[in-house]
Amino acid sequence: MATNRPPGPRGHWLTGNIRPYEADRIGFLRRCHTEYGDVFSFDERTVCVIDPVVAHDVLARTGGDFVTELTPFDGPPDLEFAAASGREWTPARRAARAGLVAQATTTIDIRTAQILDQVLTATGGHEVDVLDVMRAFAARSIADHCLGADAGDVPRTLADAIAATAPFETASYAAPPWLPTVRRRRFRYAHRRFTETLSDVVARRRAAGDRRPGSSGAGDPTPAADLLDVLLAADPTLPDHLVVSTLRTVLIGGYGVPAAALTSIVRELALRPRLVARLRTDAGQAGGGRADGGLAGAVVAEVLRLHPPAWLLTRTVRRDTTVGRWSVRAGDEVLLNAFLIHRDPRWWPRPDEFDPDRWLAGGTAPGMAYLPFGAGPRVCLGTMLTRRQLAVVTARLAGRFTISSPDAASVGPAFAGRLAPAGLRARFTA
């Protein structure tokens, strides 16, 4: 294949661009974008994309020319195995998507509000780390959606697995795959325990008998209680390992993104008392709130634009191909920068201004320049449920709690893992 690599900074002969990137991650990427254009090379095996059309093309070709869901270490990636795993997982994804869409109902809204009230009431009106609190809420909420009364220890093992993954998400340099580091041992232990916990729940539910949507064990009509019911009722029957892997994916996705987004929402509400007053009025006029629309929905859409938790979407090149007009090789990494796409003045008027009203009165995203949940065949499974959940929580925060924060005006975003305000603290008073 002819080499037609995109331009990019040369970097240090030994450390490449790691040092300037670590000093100011988004600043470095902005400078490269200005100097080299919408597609540039970060290093000899990594390409960055800040063109919405090219980004959507890469996402649309996931499963073919690109793969995702690679382990953070274990040596050279097995790209064909990753592609085959993605194909095997397709029936489970269809069932999970249908189940998550079906869960986006007023019943789930009520349960979401109940869990939020419990988590925030437990803070006792004390000043807390907002991200920690929202992680606790997200873990309980997504476990409840997926497993209902069987959630048990899942929120804790989920949080442990995410915590063990964080060092690999934030590090720019990976130690050799053969090196048995403490972080790797912690990662393997936490994820093995998380998987075993889910496997036990699936096995118990399977053994308990018929809980299919529309039928109880006694033959009486009953709706699906949770996502696990939907997966176990799938036709054709899904093997347990696919049920477990699907639950893992939904739980992990339903933990990190909502927690980060809610932390940004809390910051915006703490800074904007007039917006809080408008949300209260809007909820009152709607008879208690609009689950996925109205002003709360607009606030969510704008937070996801200005502060997208998944600010970098990663794909690995499966086989030699192109990104836009540039060549990439099998094994290269392609980083799609949602943060900079969402703040590009070519696509967005007043791109750095927080303005929920841009989404009201039929306002929509311009073209392909909005991808908070990705796109293509691997778009986030829980997009509809997550947007609804965030809107419900936004309305609940404004309507039931007074938020005071000593540092909302001064904290900045942490460009590592899921994007969220770094160290934001607040007090929630009912």
Image (tube, rainbow, N blue to C red):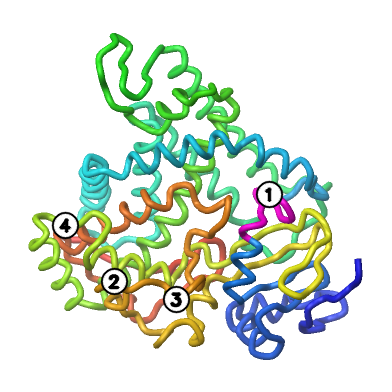
Q: Is the residue 63 above or below the residue 153 in the image?
A: below
68 in magenta: yes
Kindly report the distance in space between the C-alpha atoms of the residues bearing marks 2 and 3.
12 Å
Q: How many marks?
A: 4
Q: Is the residue 424 above or below the residue 314 in the image?
A: below
Kindly report the distance in space between the C-alpha atoms of the residues bearing marks 3 and 4.
27 Å
Could you classify mark 1 by the number of other residues whose Cα lies within 10 Å: few (under 14), some (14-19), or many (20 or more)?
many
Looking at the picture, how far across and down is residue 86, in whole percent? 66, 42
Residue at the image point whose x is 39% and y is 62% from the top: 261
Residue at the image point whose x is 48% and y is 59% from the top: 373
Q: Nearer the viewer, mark 1 or mark 2?
A: 2
Residue at the image point whose x is 68% and y is 85% from the top: 37
- Give the amino acid at mark 3: Pro
Looking at the picture, how far across and down is residue 182, in whole percent? 69, 47
Kindly report the distance in space between the C-alpha atoms of the residues bearing marks 4 and 1.
39 Å
Q: Earlier in the sequence, mark 2 or mark 4?
A: 4
Residue numbers of the magenta segment: 59-71
- Give the amino acid at mark 4: Gly
Q: Secondary structure at mark 2?
A: loop
Could you classify mark 3 by the number of other residues whose Cα lies within 10 Å: few (under 14), some (14-19), or many (20 or more)?
few
Asked whether, in this view, residue 145 is left or right of residue 29, the answer is: left
Could you classify mark 2 by the number of other residues whose Cα lies within 10 Å: few (under 14), some (14-19), or many (20 or more)?
few
40 in magenta: no
Q: Which residue is mark 1?
A: 63
Q: Which residue is mark 2?
A: 362
- Give the amino acid at mark 2: Gly
Kindly report the distance in space between the C-alpha atoms of the residues bearing marks 2 and 4.
19 Å
**Secondary structure mostly taken by the magenta-highlighted segment of the chain:** loop
Q: Which mark is residue 289?
A: 4
Specify the quadrant of the image occupied by residue 315: bottom right
Q: Which residue is mark 3?
A: 366
Does any portion of residue 306 appear in the rendered image? yes
